[in-house]
Amino acid sequence: MVYQAAADRYEKLPYRRVSDSGLIVPAVSFGLWRNLGDTMPLENSRKVILKAFDEGIFSFDNAFNYGPNNGTAEETFGQVYKSDLKPYRNELVITTKAGYHMWPGPMGEFSGRKTLINALDTSLLKMNLDYVDILYAHRFDPNTNLAETARALDTLVRQGKALYVGVSNYTAEQTKAIAEIFKELGTPFIGNQVSYNMLNQEQKNSGLLDILDEHHAGLFAYGPLAEGLLTDRYLDGVPEDFPIHKTNGFLFENGRDALTAKLRDLNELAQGRQQTLSQMSLAWLLQDKRVASVVIGTSSVDHLMDNLEFTKNLDFSADELAAIDKIINR
């Protein structure tokens, strides 16, 4: 059966312009990190991806190394794109990243010129694309001078293989340094994709948002639910083997009981807003207009639809925001 996108897909979600650039993205982007790939039946992946598009999510976020097994998320997306989404390419914002381990040998990671160029060429083949909308350097490379990384990304734009470039997991200082190089080169730098959530507000406090705004770029927030902590699954306690992302490891510094108490109080606040904890957490991220899009991932249509309910209540009172801050900072 030939896929036909929902006619009302652009009536369902808010959209945001990235700073004052010409790039507009949905408030929610679909991330393929660990959720879709070779261990998931293709038909299930297809169903979730197409449902996301039908609900107004036209931004799909990938990386060379994503998937249960390295690289398989791009392959999965490429199959769905080829069979169903290709007629809609002009509507789609498709992003990928290069920098974590991608292939054997010393050239298979980080951000040297050869590595970045080879990585994008391979990603385009896997996804059946001629270009990506955003190519991110996936992590800061401590051994390669920043100018080489910036010029490699600039080359890929000039070759027509990427429309915009970005960085991911760069600190505020690292972002400022490479943004200055992009400015000199005339490279369309669009943003930094970083871990950011209600429990982990480092990006808000580090000055990164201000630096991005200064350079006409935005923040793309991954890990918005802190690997699931900001859901109702851990209100009775967080297990010892909880797989926390390294960027959120500090959340356990005062012990699991203290964290659980915070989650319970945040959940009570969410209930007062007629939202789940996860819905309130997603809505909170969009309070700052410098946050361009929130990247969520799922392998379930039901889970996707439950999360998207948050867009029905994006407004917070001053008292609610103050209460959240008090809970987080105690």
Image (cartoon, rainbow, N blue to C red):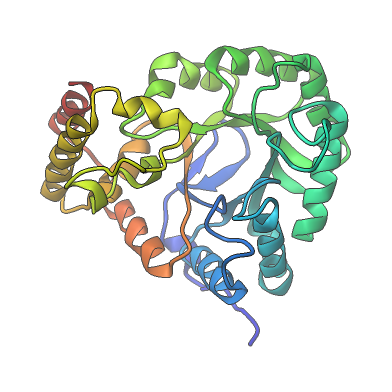
Where does the image place residue 246, in percent across and percent down from the top left?
47, 31
Q: How many marks do you count on the picture?
A: 0
For the N terminus, which image quadrant?
Answer: bottom right
Residue at 61% over, 33% down:
21
In front: 132, or 66?
A: 66
For the C terminus, which image quadrant?
Answer: top left
Q: Which of the 4 quarters of the picture holds residue 206? A: top left
In front: 63, or 104?
A: 104
Left or right: 250 in relation to 320: right
Residue furthest out toward the bottom? 1
Left or right: 136 in relation to 247: right
In the displayed structure, would residue 285 be above or below residue 122? above
Q: Which of the 4 quarters of the picture holds residue 268? A: top left
Q: Can residue 149 be seen in this view?
A: yes
In the displayed structure, would residue 156 be above or below residue 130? above
Left or right: 135 in relation to 47: right
Residue at 52% over, 22% down:
213
